[in-house]
Image (cartoon, helix red, strand yellow):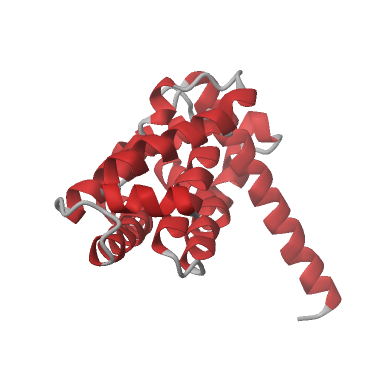
């Protein structure tokens, strides 16, 4: 690409990112259902016709915002956790960082809740990315079970319970109290691991 072409591309991406931020702000303030494309266009400082250049519908805009959020914040958490060879440390890293992500902004509540508003194809794509958390947790739990560190309970139930503990945070967390996020992460990890580990696993943890 020429320098001029790169600049045009950057300007389009910047404008698109700006629209995503403004739209998400409105979804948080007014709710997804009560937010219109006209409102988004006005908040973004563009005409409704120009908005259609960036998104064909409000549903598509919600999908693109959610996809962008997961790819920029959630996927890196999964990738970083996957680099940890020790299954317990892998679980701790994932649960802590995922908790920080869910407590960072009320936008998390909107995005989680409004998955129901997506068309099936878009919803399936989002759920497939969320599913990576389940896969990571289940594999880590199985590894801990095989080494005798985790109880021999159904691994799929344990994985869903662990991920569900974090997902549910968005519905009750007070986003004005960011100072409490680390304490919450520590509490969640402690409660989950104490329920998961065998007595032998707990003794090993104390020795370490």
Residue 178 quadrant: top right
Left or right: 85 in relation to 180? left
Where residue 68 appears, x then y in whole percent? 53, 53
Q: Residue at x 36, y 53 (%)?
A: 130
Which residue: 27% across, 54% down? 150
On screen, residue 62 above or below 184: below
**Residue 48 visible in the shown view:** yes
With 193 as the anchor, is 3 left or right in this view?
Answer: right
Q: Nearer the viewer, residue 160 or 53?
A: 160
Left or right for 7, reference 130: right
Above or below, 31 relative to 205? above
Q: Which of these two is toward me, 106 or 204? A: 204
Hey, which residue is sitting farthest right in the picture?
3
Q: What residue appears at the point 61 percent right and 18 percent down from the top-left corner?
A: 176
Q: Position of residue 186 (x, y in %)?
A: 50, 36
Between 23 and 77, the one nearer to me in the picture? 77
């Amino acid at each position: 690409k020429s320098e001029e072409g790169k600049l045009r591309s950057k300007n389009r991406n910047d404008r698109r990112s700006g629209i995503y931020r403004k739209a998400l702000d409105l979804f948080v303030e007014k709710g997804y259902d009560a937010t219109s494309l006209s409102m988004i266009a006005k908040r973004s400082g563009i005409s409704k016709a120009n908005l259609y250049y960036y998104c064909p519908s409000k549903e598509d805009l919600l999908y693109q915002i959610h996809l962008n959020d997961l790819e920029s914040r959630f996927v890196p958490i999964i990738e970083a956790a996957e680099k940890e060879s020790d299954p317990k440390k892998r679980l701790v890293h994932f649960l802590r960082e995922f908790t920080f992500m869910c407590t960072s902004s009320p936008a998390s509540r909107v995005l989680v809740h409004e998955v129901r508003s997506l068309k099936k194809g878009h919803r399936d794509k989002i759920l497939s990315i969320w599913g990576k958390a389940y896969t990571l947790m289940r594999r880590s739990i199985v590894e801990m079970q095989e080494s005798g560190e985790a109880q021999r309970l159904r691994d799929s139930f344990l994985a869903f319970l662990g991920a569900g503990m974090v997902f549910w945070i968005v519905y009750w967390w007070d986003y004005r109290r960011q100072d409490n996020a680390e304490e919450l992460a520590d509490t969640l990890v402690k409660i989950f691991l104490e329920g998961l580990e065998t007595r032998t696993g707990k003794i090993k943890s104390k020795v370490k």
